[in-house]
Image: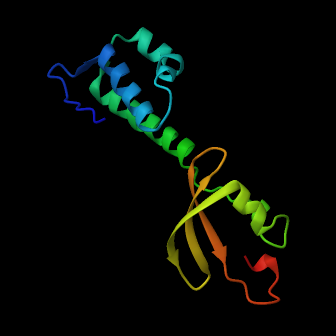
Amino acid sequence: GQVMLVRPQNGLLPGSRVRQVLEELYKSFGQDPALVATRFSSVLDNAPDMAFQHFLQLYNHILEVLRDYVFPKTKVDRRFIIGEKGTAEDMHKLYEMKEKLGEGAFGTVLRAVNRITKKDCVIKVMHLQAGAPIEQL
């Protein structure tokens, strides 16, 4: 759901509204909203009202942390580099391949779903020239 947030005239956001907005943010990332009370009790319990500008800074910080947690920036699962440690069969056991997202000179990019975590991910199938060493990846 969407949360409408308007700057209060007095510049202070009531603590109950701060908690509500943070819980909605957690829900939007598929996280348990009860974690807000646990993780931010020192902030929420000691400040019944929060300056709107301070709240925006807190919200932005939490948004970045959740984004990086849910969508890690760089995570390459090297177990499935064919010829190194894994096989294509191993990869298909862990990932359900979905649609092709794109193709270029170096490979094909597919959307996939991790069968264990149920999280979406991207898999790049590299086109190596015959006899090329794996280090060229």
Looking at the rendered structure, the number of numbered marks drawn on it comes to 0
Q: State which quadrant residue 15 falls in.
A: top left
Residue 110 position, x and y percent, is 56, 68
- For the point 28% across and 26% down, the residue is 52
Q: Is residue 78 visible?
A: no
Can residue 124 be seen by looking at this rendering? yes
User: Does 89 sit above or below residue 69?
Assistant: below
Instruction: Residue at the far bottom: name it.
Output: 130
Along the horizontal axis of the image, is 9 left or right of 60?
Answer: left
Render colour scheme: rainbow
Quarter of the image where one finds residue 6? top left
Residue 104 or residue 53, whichever sits in front = 104
**Is 112 located above or below residue 14 in the figure?**
below
Q: Residue at x 45, y 36 (%)?
A: 61
Quadrant where the C terminus lies? bottom right
Asked whether 31 or 89 is in front, the reply is 89
**Closer to the camera in the image, 50 or 117:** 117
Residue at x 51% of width, y 39% of height: 65
Front position in the image: 47 or 103: 103
Q: Residue at 70% x, 54% y: name it.
A: 94
Residue 12 image offset from top left, x and y in percent: 25, 19
List x then y, in percent, for residue 62.
Answer: 46, 34
Q: Quadrant of the N terminus?
A: top left
